[in-house]
Amino acid sequence: MKSYLYGIKRSVPVFFGFLPVAVTFAIMAGSAGLGKMETVLMSVFVFAGASQIMAVGQIMAGSGAVSIIIATFVLNLRHVIMSTCIFKRVRVKNILLRFACALSVTDEGFALITTEDEEKCDIPFLLGIITLTYLSWIFGTVVGVVASSILPQIVADSFGIALYALFLALIVPDIKGSLRLLATVLITAALNCALCMLIESSQAIIISTLVGALIGAFIVEDKAEEGVLA
Protein backbone atom coordinates (compact mmCIF):
# COMPACT_ATOMS: atom_id res chain seq x y z
CA MET A 1 0.00 0.00 0.00
CA LYS A 2 2.87 2.35 0.82
CA SER A 3 4.43 1.82 -2.60
CA TYR A 4 1.05 2.36 -4.30
CA LEU A 5 0.56 5.69 -2.50
CA TYR A 6 4.11 6.69 -3.42
CA GLY A 7 3.29 6.08 -7.09
CA ILE A 8 0.25 8.35 -6.76
CA LYS A 9 2.35 11.01 -5.03
CA ARG A 10 4.96 10.94 -7.82
CA SER A 11 2.18 11.38 -10.39
CA VAL A 12 0.74 14.60 -8.94
CA PRO A 13 2.73 16.87 -11.32
CA VAL A 14 1.47 14.79 -14.25
CA PHE A 15 -2.09 15.27 -13.00
CA PHE A 16 -1.79 19.04 -13.40
CA GLY A 17 -0.01 18.62 -16.73
CA PHE A 18 -2.74 16.36 -18.13
CA LEU A 19 -5.65 18.66 -17.24
CA PRO A 20 -5.14 21.44 -19.82
CA VAL A 21 -4.36 18.96 -22.60
CA ALA A 22 -7.43 16.85 -21.78
CA VAL A 23 -9.62 19.97 -21.67
CA THR A 24 -8.23 21.02 -25.05
CA PHE A 25 -8.94 17.58 -26.50
CA ALA A 26 -12.56 17.66 -25.28
CA ILE A 27 -13.17 21.11 -26.76
CA MET A 28 -11.61 20.08 -30.08
CA ALA A 29 -13.68 16.88 -30.10
CA GLY A 30 -16.86 18.90 -29.67
CA SER A 31 -15.84 21.19 -32.53
CA ALA A 32 -15.21 18.09 -34.67
CA GLY A 33 -18.77 16.89 -34.10
CA LEU A 34 -18.25 14.25 -31.41
CA GLY A 35 -20.96 14.02 -28.76
CA LYS A 36 -20.22 14.52 -25.07
CA MET A 37 -20.50 10.83 -24.25
CA GLU A 38 -18.40 9.87 -27.29
CA THR A 39 -15.69 12.28 -26.19
CA VAL A 40 -15.54 10.95 -22.63
CA LEU A 41 -15.64 7.31 -23.74
CA MET A 42 -12.79 7.96 -26.17
CA SER A 43 -10.62 9.05 -23.23
CA VAL A 44 -11.81 6.07 -21.16
CA PHE A 45 -10.97 3.45 -23.79
CA VAL A 46 -8.09 5.06 -25.72
CA PHE A 47 -6.18 7.03 -23.06
CA ALA A 48 -3.61 8.48 -25.47
CA GLY A 49 -3.49 12.27 -25.57
CA ALA A 50 -1.44 12.85 -28.71
CA SER A 51 -3.29 10.15 -30.64
CA GLN A 52 -6.71 11.39 -29.56
CA ILE A 53 -5.88 14.95 -30.59
CA MET A 54 -4.48 13.72 -33.90
CA ALA A 55 -7.60 11.62 -34.50
CA VAL A 56 -9.88 14.58 -33.76
CA GLY A 57 -7.79 16.77 -36.05
CA GLN A 58 -8.16 14.24 -38.86
CA ILE A 59 -11.91 14.00 -38.25
CA MET A 60 -12.08 17.78 -38.63
CA ALA A 61 -10.10 17.44 -41.88
CA GLY A 62 -12.59 14.87 -43.18
CA SER A 63 -10.27 11.83 -43.07
CA GLY A 64 -11.71 8.32 -43.19
CA ALA A 65 -11.60 5.74 -40.41
CA VAL A 66 -8.81 3.69 -42.02
CA SER A 67 -6.53 6.72 -42.34
CA ILE A 68 -7.16 7.71 -38.73
CA ILE A 69 -6.44 4.19 -37.45
CA ILE A 70 -3.20 3.91 -39.41
CA ALA A 71 -1.98 7.38 -38.39
CA THR A 72 -2.63 6.79 -34.68
CA PHE A 73 -1.11 3.31 -34.90
CA VAL A 74 2.12 4.74 -36.33
CA LEU A 75 2.18 7.48 -33.69
CA ASN A 76 1.76 4.92 -30.89
CA LEU A 77 4.45 2.49 -32.04
CA ARG A 78 6.77 4.10 -29.49
CA HIS A 79 4.69 2.47 -26.75
CA VAL A 80 6.00 -0.96 -27.77
CA ILE A 81 9.51 0.12 -26.82
CA MET A 82 8.37 1.93 -23.67
CA SER A 83 6.35 -1.07 -22.48
CA THR A 84 9.33 -3.37 -22.98
CA CYS A 85 11.56 -1.07 -20.91
CA ILE A 86 8.96 -0.84 -18.14
CA PHE A 87 8.44 -4.62 -17.98
CA LYS A 88 12.20 -5.12 -17.68
CA ARG A 89 12.53 -2.49 -14.96
CA VAL A 90 9.47 -3.46 -12.93
CA ARG A 91 9.91 -7.18 -13.66
CA VAL A 92 6.28 -7.91 -14.50
CA LYS A 93 5.88 -11.66 -15.00
CA ASN A 94 2.12 -12.23 -15.03
CA ILE A 95 0.96 -12.06 -18.66
CA LEU A 96 -2.45 -10.57 -17.83
CA LEU A 97 -0.84 -7.88 -15.69
CA ARG A 98 1.58 -7.16 -18.53
CA PHE A 99 -1.34 -6.46 -20.89
CA ALA A 100 -3.09 -4.31 -18.29
CA CYS A 101 0.04 -2.24 -17.69
CA ALA A 102 0.88 -1.94 -21.38
CA LEU A 103 -2.55 -0.49 -22.13
CA SER A 104 -1.93 2.24 -19.56
CA VAL A 105 1.61 3.32 -20.51
CA THR A 106 2.04 7.03 -21.26
CA ASP A 107 5.08 9.16 -22.06
CA GLU A 108 4.85 10.80 -18.63
CA GLY A 109 4.39 7.50 -16.81
CA PHE A 110 7.37 6.08 -18.67
CA ALA A 111 9.47 9.06 -17.57
CA LEU A 112 8.44 8.59 -13.93
CA ILE A 113 9.24 4.88 -13.90
CA THR A 114 12.57 5.05 -15.75
CA THR A 115 13.88 7.90 -13.57
CA GLU A 116 12.87 6.29 -10.26
CA ASP A 117 15.25 4.15 -8.18
CA GLU A 118 14.93 0.60 -9.46
CA GLU A 119 14.31 -0.89 -6.00
CA LYS A 120 11.19 1.27 -5.69
CA CYS A 121 9.81 0.22 -9.09
CA ASP A 122 7.43 -2.56 -8.11
CA ILE A 123 3.90 -3.41 -9.23
CA PRO A 124 2.06 -1.27 -6.63
CA PHE A 125 4.22 1.74 -7.60
CA LEU A 126 3.34 1.23 -11.26
CA LEU A 127 -0.35 0.83 -10.46
CA GLY A 128 -0.27 4.04 -8.41
CA ILE A 129 1.08 5.96 -11.39
CA ILE A 130 -1.49 4.42 -13.71
CA THR A 131 -4.36 5.21 -11.32
CA LEU A 132 -3.74 8.95 -11.04
CA THR A 133 -2.69 9.56 -14.65
CA TYR A 134 -5.69 7.65 -16.02
CA LEU A 135 -8.20 9.35 -13.73
CA SER A 136 -6.70 12.80 -14.38
CA TRP A 137 -7.08 12.35 -18.14
CA ILE A 138 -10.72 11.34 -17.82
CA PHE A 139 -11.39 14.14 -15.30
CA GLY A 140 -9.83 16.71 -17.63
CA THR A 141 -11.95 15.42 -20.51
CA VAL A 142 -15.13 15.79 -18.46
CA VAL A 143 -14.11 19.34 -17.50
CA GLY A 144 -13.50 20.11 -21.16
CA VAL A 145 -16.88 18.73 -22.19
CA VAL A 146 -18.58 20.95 -19.63
CA ALA A 147 -16.46 23.97 -20.58
CA SER A 148 -17.22 23.54 -24.28
CA SER A 149 -20.90 24.23 -23.61
CA ILE A 150 -20.06 27.41 -21.69
CA LEU A 151 -17.29 29.01 -23.75
CA PRO A 152 -18.16 31.13 -26.81
CA GLN A 153 -17.82 29.18 -30.06
CA ILE A 154 -14.99 31.36 -31.35
CA VAL A 155 -12.96 30.59 -28.20
CA ALA A 156 -13.69 26.87 -28.44
CA ASP A 157 -12.66 26.80 -32.11
CA SER A 158 -9.36 28.52 -31.30
CA PHE A 159 -8.30 25.50 -29.25
CA GLY A 160 -7.61 23.71 -32.54
CA ILE A 161 -4.12 25.18 -32.46
CA ALA A 162 -3.39 22.94 -29.47
CA LEU A 163 -2.75 20.05 -31.89
CA TYR A 164 0.26 21.85 -33.29
CA ALA A 165 1.36 23.23 -29.92
CA LEU A 166 1.33 19.73 -28.42
CA PHE A 167 3.62 18.24 -31.05
CA LEU A 168 5.94 21.26 -30.94
CA ALA A 169 6.22 20.80 -27.18
CA LEU A 170 7.20 17.16 -27.73
CA ILE A 171 9.95 17.77 -30.28
CA VAL A 172 11.44 21.21 -29.49
CA PRO A 173 13.38 20.18 -26.32
CA ASP A 174 15.20 17.41 -28.20
CA ILE A 175 15.72 19.48 -31.35
CA LYS A 176 17.72 22.04 -29.35
CA GLY A 177 20.44 19.50 -28.74
CA SER A 178 20.47 17.68 -32.06
CA LEU A 179 20.94 19.16 -35.53
CA ARG A 180 20.31 15.73 -37.02
CA LEU A 181 16.93 15.51 -35.32
CA LEU A 182 16.13 19.03 -36.56
CA ALA A 183 17.03 17.93 -40.10
CA THR A 184 14.77 14.88 -39.76
CA VAL A 185 11.83 17.03 -38.61
CA LEU A 186 12.33 19.55 -41.43
CA ILE A 187 12.60 16.80 -44.06
CA THR A 188 9.44 15.15 -42.73
CA ALA A 189 7.54 18.46 -42.70
CA ALA A 190 8.68 19.33 -46.23
CA LEU A 191 7.73 15.88 -47.49
CA ASN A 192 4.29 16.16 -45.91
CA CYS A 193 3.69 19.57 -47.53
CA ALA A 194 4.75 18.23 -50.91
CA LEU A 195 2.59 15.11 -50.63
CA CYS A 196 -0.45 17.17 -49.58
CA MET A 197 -0.35 18.75 -53.06
CA LEU A 198 -0.58 15.33 -54.68
CA ILE A 199 -2.69 13.14 -52.38
CA GLU A 200 -5.12 13.48 -49.47
CA SER A 201 -3.68 15.03 -46.30
CA SER A 202 -4.61 11.94 -44.24
CA GLN A 203 -2.52 9.75 -46.55
CA ALA A 204 0.28 12.31 -46.72
CA ILE A 205 0.78 12.41 -42.96
CA ILE A 206 1.02 8.61 -42.75
CA ILE A 207 3.59 8.37 -45.54
CA SER A 208 5.67 11.32 -44.33
CA THR A 209 5.65 9.97 -40.75
CA LEU A 210 6.90 6.54 -41.86
CA VAL A 211 9.57 8.02 -44.13
CA GLY A 212 10.65 10.47 -41.42
CA ALA A 213 10.93 7.65 -38.87
CA LEU A 214 13.02 5.61 -41.33
CA ILE A 215 15.34 8.55 -41.97
CA GLY A 216 15.63 9.26 -38.25
CA ALA A 217 16.57 5.65 -37.51
CA PHE A 218 19.68 6.09 -39.67
CA ILE A 219 20.81 9.66 -38.98
CA VAL A 220 19.68 10.50 -35.42
CA GLU A 221 22.13 9.38 -32.75
CA ASP A 222 20.92 8.00 -29.44
CA LYS A 223 21.95 10.20 -26.47
CA ALA A 224 23.04 7.21 -24.45
CA GLU A 225 25.29 6.04 -27.29
CA GLU A 226 26.74 9.55 -27.64
CA GLY A 227 27.64 9.53 -23.97
CA VAL A 228 29.39 6.16 -24.30
CA LEU A 229 31.32 7.30 -27.37
CA ALA A 230 32.33 10.52 -25.63
Image (tube, helix red, strand yellow):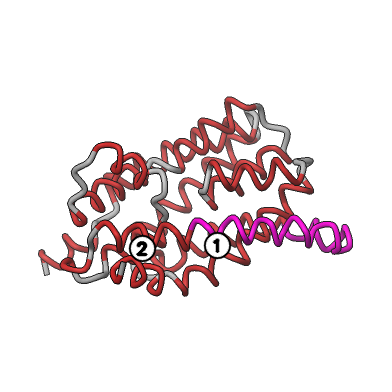
Quadrant assignment for the N terminus: bottom left
Residue located 83% across and 63% down the image: 155
Quadrant assignment for the C terminus: bottom left
Check disc 2 and give the amino acid type: Leu
Q: Which mark is residue 15?
A: none
Residue located 41% across and 57% down the image: 130
First to last magenta residue range: 134-159
- Who is closer to the viewer here, 198 or 46? 46
- Left or right: residue 108 versus residue 65 is left
Comparing labels 1 and 2, the label whose residue is closer to the camera: 1
Rounded to the nearest angstrom, the CA distance separating label 1 from label 2 is 35 Å
Label located before the other in sequence (1 or 2): 1
- What is the quadrant of residue 227 in the picture? bottom left
Q: Which mark is residue 136?
A: 1
Q: Where is residue 211 in the image (x, y as percent from the top left)?
A: 41, 37
- Left or right: residue 12 versus residue 214 is right
- What is the quadrant of residue 89 in the picture? bottom left
Check disc 1 and give the amino acid type: Ser
- Left or right: residue 114 versus residue 191 is left
Task: Give the residue furthest to the left.
Answer: 229
Residue labelled with disc 2: 179
Please determine whether, in this image, residue 66 is positioned above or below residue 229: above
Q: Where is residue 31 in the image (x, y as percent from the top left)?
A: 79, 48
**SS category of the residue bearing label 1:** helix
Residue 155 belongs to magenta span: yes
Q: Where is residue 135 in the image (x, y as percent from the top left)?
A: 53, 58
- Mark 1, residues whose alpha carbon is within 10 Å: few (<14), some, or many (≥20)? many
Q: Main secondary structure of the magenta part?
A: helix
- Who is closer to the viewer here, 4 or 200? 4
Q: Position of residue 41 (x, y in %)?
A: 63, 43
